[in-house]
Amino acid sequence: LGEDGRVTLGVSATVVSAEGLRGALEEARHARRVAAARPGAVCAAGHEELASHVLLLPFVPDDVRRAFTARLLDPLRDYDARHRAELMTTLEAFLDSDGSWTRCASRLHLHVNTLRYRVGRIEQLTGRDLSRLEDKLDFFLALRMS
């Protein structure tokens, strides 16, 4: 139990010999840190999560996390609040659709030209280009951290 009464658990991959125990222990420790960053009284994380952005995000300091997400997402949130444009919903659906215009438009029940307009507005407000992998990745991470 932690000082706050929470239970966090990290699980390593299976090992087949004593030589693998040291690495498994280290892997379980890293997984436990991932679990500790999650909300809830009881949290667990497994070794499969260590080969993902999930491992990195809990270790980003809160002030860096807030600044990063604010810089990317606040212009969209503000615009949505003023115009009810659903740019945040559009961004999430676009990324979840792997940037596929037709799948995203279908998912949102929009004409593809309406989707193109919304994505263009997202790009205009943020100065990012959603055809670039780096910009998609930044948005993906900002959404995960927010």
Image (spheres, rainbow, N blue to C red):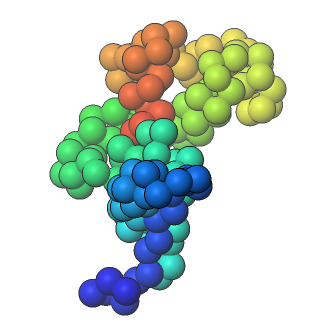
Residue 34 falls left or right of residue 119: left
105 versus 146 height, above or below: above
Residue 65 falls left or right of residue 28: left
**Residue sitting at x 58%, y 36%:** 92
Name the quadrant containing residue 113: top right
Name the one closer to the observer, 113 or 35. 35
Name the one closer to the observer, 127 or 140. 140
Q: Which quarter of the image is occupied by the N terminus?
A: bottom left
Image position, residue 142 (x, y; %): 39, 39
**Residue sitting at x 35%, y 23%:** 126
**Residue sitting at x 41%, y 47%:** 55
72 versus 24 height, above or below: above
Name the one closer to the observer, 12 or 88. 12
Disc count in the image?
0
Please indicate, yes or no, whether residue 79 appears anywhere in the rendered image.
no
Image position, residue 108 (x, y; %): 74, 33
Residue most toward the front?
18
44 versus 101 height, above or below: below
Name the one closer to the observer, 63 or 2. 2
Please indicate, yes or no, whether residue 9 appears anywhere in the rendered image.
yes
**Residue sitting at x 44%, y 81%:** 7
Image position, residue 8 (x, y; %): 44, 74
96 versus 1 height, above or below: above
Residue 81 falls left or right of residue 97: left
